[in-house]
């Protein structure tokens, strides 16, 4: 988090968030391509990269979102952002579970079903780059106010 904070201060939350989402998407691809014979070290490296991407994408996006609102809107924005995060996370988890479950119900091999779930996460990560890019452009036009 200290590294993420410094990068956010230097480059802006939108830019860091897009970079983190890119790293996350790149890390999902090898997971979706791994088979039962993949070595543990390879899995650990990819999961570490995935964690780095998530760390670089979540907190900077929230910081950037808060930077775009005025101080008098903060009391309203905080619970709304909290609700969006919780509902969005739940929906994403449910979609992934449904994709895996449908694959298993169709008698696919479990690894094939999990690969389908990972590809759905990849698609969601790529889609998340759209609002992060918009946030980057908003912050570029409107500088962050000193508080």
Image (cartoon, helix red, strand yellow):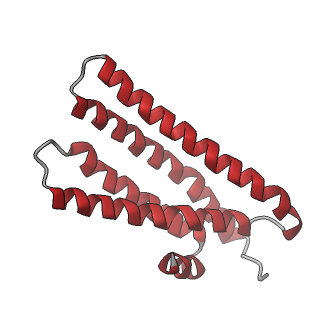
Q: Would you place residue 72 above or below residue 82 in this image?
A: below
Q: Quadrant location of residue 69?
A: bottom right
Residue at the far front in the pictured view: 40
Asked whether, in this view, residue 4 is left or right of residue 81, the answer is: left
The residue shown at (55%, 45%) is: 89
Query: Which quadrant is home to the C terminus?
Result: bottom right
Who is closer to the viewer here, 76 or 124?
76
Residue at the far left in the pictured view: 37
Asked whether, in this view, residue 50 is left or right of residue 77, the answer is: left
- Residue 39 in the image: x percent, y percent? 13, 55
So how many labels did they put on this image? 0
- Residue 111 in the image: x percent, y percent? 22, 34
The residue shown at (24%, 61%) is: 44
The residue shown at (13%, 50%) is: 38
- Residue 96 in the image: x percent, y percent? 43, 35
Residue at the far right in the pictured view: 72
- Residue 118 in the image: x percent, y percent? 34, 41
Who is closer to the viewer here, 101 or 8?
101
Q: Quadrant location of residue 78?
A: bottom right
The residue shown at (28%, 37%) is: 115
Q: Would you place residue 78 above or below residue 127 in this image?
A: below
Q: Quadrant location of residue 22?
A: bottom left
């Amino acid at each position: 988090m200290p590294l993420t904070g410094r990068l956010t201060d230097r480059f802006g939350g939108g830019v860091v968030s897009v970079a983190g989402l890119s790293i996350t998407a790149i890390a999902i691809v090898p997971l979706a391509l791994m088979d039962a014979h993949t070595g543990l070290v390879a899995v650990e490296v990819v999961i570490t990269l995935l964690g780095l991407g998530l760390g670089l994408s979540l907190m900077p996006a929230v910081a950037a979102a808060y930077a775009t609102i005025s101080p008098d809107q903060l009391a309203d924005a905080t619970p709304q952002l909290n609700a969006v995060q919780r509902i969005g996370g739940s929906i994403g988890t449910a979609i992934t579970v449904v994709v895996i479950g449908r694959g298993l119900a169709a008698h696919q091999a479990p690894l094939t079903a999990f690969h389908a779930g990972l590809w759905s996460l990849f698609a969601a990560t790529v889609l998340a780059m759209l609002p992060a890019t918009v946030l980057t452009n908003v912050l570029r036009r409107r500088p962050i106010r000193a508080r």
